[in-house]
Image (cartoon, grey):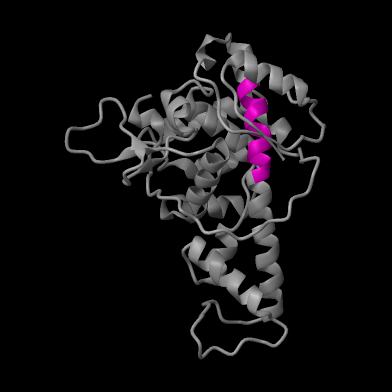
Amino acid sequence: VSAIRVDSTADLLENLRSTNLLDIGDNAAVPPVLFVNLPDDMNNLDVATKKKAFINTLLPISLIALNEVAQEKKFLQAILDKLGSAEDTLFFDDEIIWPQNVSDEEIDLLQHLARKYRTNSIEKLLLRVDVLPVSLILAQGALESSWGGSRFVAEGNNLFGIWTWSDKGMIPANRDKYARHKVASYDTLLDSVRAYLLMINRLPAYTSLRQLRSRTENSVDIAEGLLFYSERRDSYIEDVRQIIVTNELQRFDAMELTEYFQWQPREESVNLVSLAGSSDAKI
């Protein structure tokens, strides 16, 4: 995987061009290029170029993050198939006797996923460990970051306006005098996408979205579950849908990476309990 840090929009466009991402076709395989950041002069681009640069930068990053979740889901289902239990609740204490065909490594992985997605319910775990249409990621990233032009992207790689109550973060403009939240800061754009996916997949606010996702892969329909992402509620959902439709983002939903990556479990250090995006935090 190539990891690229850019200093300007000229640098970004040149790297998109050299990695065959600038003019990627609708049915093309996507090279796994990781842009670490977006430049702070995104707003100097004309609208069409800005949108194109944003989409084609975020596309491979989103596919890599989705690939990680897809492999989690694959391993989870394989282990659950071995268990074949009618019980919905997973227990991990020393007194539990596991089937002989389930290895210690698989038990550790199952416990890791239960901890990461904050549930010991098999039913809930299967609903939470799942992917999203890339068009929904692109649309929300565009809306929350003003197509990559917000200061939260420039200063902290935060594409989705995710809040935090930890020390690491950026204070939003016009924050209420007594408020203590910050806008989370990430080392890379990939970390921002990972945090967004984890938030959608495990917070109670998005239970309805996960249920919708279990019935459809259509991003316009799934967007109905974003009611609590923003204080603007229904109007926010309509904005997300409009971005998807107007920019024909669903054409990216069938795209795949040119390379396959082996997923490795890793400890999560994401501090996120927000329900609102930067559209509410003020860019």
Residue drawn at 66 percent across, 33 percent down: 59
279 on left or right of 215 = left
Dominant secondary structure of the residues highlighted in magenta in the image: helix
Report which quarter residue 107 is drawn in.
Answer: bottom right
Residue 134's place in the image compared with 131, above or below, is: above
Residue 161 position, x and y percent, is 43, 35
Answer whether residue 217 is visible to the viewer in this image.
no
Which residue is situated farthest in the left direction here? 178
Task: Work out whether residue 272 or residue 138 is closer to the camera in this orientation and state it.
Answer: 272
Residue 122 belongs to the span the image colors magenta: no
Nearest the viewer among 103 and 71 is: 103
Where is 200 relative to 36, above or below?
below
Quadrant in the picture for residue 83: bottom right
Task: Pinpoint residue 119: horizontal percent, then vertical percent.
Answer: 48, 67
Task: Classify residue 25 as left or right of residue 49.
Answer: right
Can you see residue 241?
A: yes
Residue at screen point 56% across, 81% down = 87
The quadrant of the rendering that contains the C terminus is: top left
Seen at 24% across and 41% down, the residue is 180
Residue stretch rendered in magenta on the structure: 53-64
Which residue lies at the image location 50% right of the left edge and 87% below the top edge? 94
* Residue 97 position within the rendered picture, expressed as x and y whole percent measured from the top left: 59, 90
